[in-house]
Amino acid sequence: MINIIGLGYIGLPTALMFAKSGIKVVGTDNNEKLVETLTNGELTFDEEGLEELFNEALNNGIQFVTDYRKTNTYIIAVPTPYIKESKKLDPKYVISAVNSVLDVCVKGSLIIIESTISPGSIDKYVRPEVEKRGLVIGQDVHLVHAPERIIPGNMIYELEHNSRTIGADDFEIGEKVKKLYSSFCKAEIVLTDIASAEMSKVVENTYRDINIAFANELTKICRKDNRDVYEIIKIANRHPRVNILQPGPGVGGHCISVDPWFLVGDYPDLTNLILTARKINDSMPTHVLGRIRDIMRLHDIKDISKIGIYGLTYKENVDDTRESPTIQLLERMDEHLAFGVKVFDPMVRTRIVDHQFMNFEDFINEIEVLVIMVGHDHIKMNMDLIKEKHVLDTRNVCTFESCYKL
């Protein structure tokens, strides 16, 4: 039996995949309401293909509980935030989960950490917790790092088809974990040491953050001289060795917007490029605020309540609002005493911010300026309802030429 700890965006789909493969799975989370919801056969977030997978896992006997079970295999998929002041990893959830596992696990158990952690975290935070109890790593317990590599909106496919990395102290243990993940992963599974696995995951997301920052900085350069950044990127990308990403209103989610800070926090004297990229991407909500001001001045709009923000999630067609650029934008507005801006997102079905509308047409009827922060399919299918508004399109999804761009 596998006891999977943490039933959020990573832990739940992973648990369901193992259960679908015929492995006995118990999912543990300290959120009683979440566990109750899952036990009642209801999902806690939307994801394409997740409902079918959930039903298969239920048919195969998956259980959801708030306690830790005695077994020999644990997968830890708890949140790993960073400390904003120091930019270092906050390991409290991982440490708590590891100690709870150590309270109940049998001798020789596998403790597999899927949570993204900063390089060196297992040596710094996890091994000492094991050793405090007088346990011998490699005999009493085996530590493994198997970082997740999936994205909301395409989780099920990526769980099956993305390559995985298994970091272990011992090659035989690594092979054992590889066989476990092979029960559903059809892609290559690479074995390495724990330190390399830790670093590789953070480096992957840092690489993407830097590339997005280049596109966003290019956007600011083009805005200064009123050039079309999208046309320039399209032409430049025709070069066989150039692949510039698309700019946007900021970077959200729990990976790209967080993981690079782990490197900045741990290597402050060596991460000049990474730090600059983080600052550029974090500055984009302020850039959007400046563009809103430009449009309001151009059209002599003085009432901030006539501004509508479309999209609360951090990317299109998901309900995940973690580190959302829109929420960052609303915070900037709050700092500037800009109260009353209206908000709508078709994917977010509960009110999480002030002046959030649940009906799109009501939302549109109340505003003069529409700021598209997320390119949901919903907005692409409703272009006819917005073409009479002053539209700031930060995602380059508008099908008419009269809109404003970043």
Image (tube, rainbow, N blue to C red):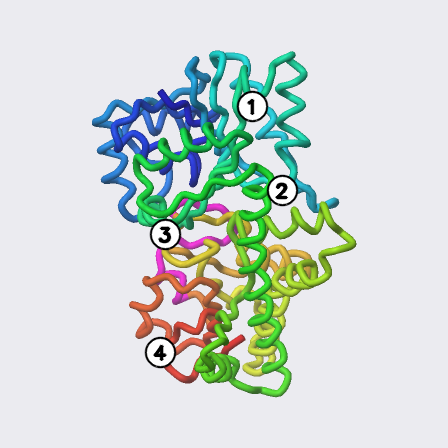
Q: Given the image, on which type of amino acid does mark 1 rest? A: Val
Estimate how packed mark 2 is, as few (under 14), some (14 to 19) or many (20 or more) residues with alpha carbons within 10 Å: many
Residue 264: percent from left, percent from top: 70, 51
Query: Callout 2, which amino acid?
Result: Ser
| Residue 58 placement, left or right of 316 | left
Q: Nearer the viewer, mark 4 or mark 2?
A: 2
From the viewer's side, name the closer residue of 396 and 86. 86
What distance separates the C-alpha of mark 3 from that of mark 1? 29 Å
Residue drawn at the location 71% of the way across and 47% of the way down: 265
Residue 165 x %, y %: 46, 43
Question: In what quadrant of the picture does the N terminus appear?
Answer: top left
N-term-proximal mark, 4 vs 2: 2
Give the class, few, some or many, for how many residues have Cα within 10 Å of label 1's Cα (few <14, many ≥20): many
Are discs 4 and 1 less than 8 Å apart at CB?
A: no
Residue type (three-letter) at the residue carrying disc 4:
Thr
Residue 342 in view: yes
Q: Is residue 361 magenta?
A: yes
The image's mark for residue 118 is: 2
- Per the rendered image, the range of residues in magenta is 349-365
CA distance separating discs 4 and 1:
51 Å
Q: Dot 3 corresponds to which residue?
A: 153
Please state which amino acid type lies under the numbered disc 3: Gly
Q: Are marks 3 and 1 in contact (CB under 8 Å)?
A: no
Of the 4 image quadrants, the one containing the C terminus is bottom right
- Quickly name the residue at label 1: 98
Q: Is residue 302 above or below residue 305?
A: below
- Relative depth, front residue between 28 and 334: 28
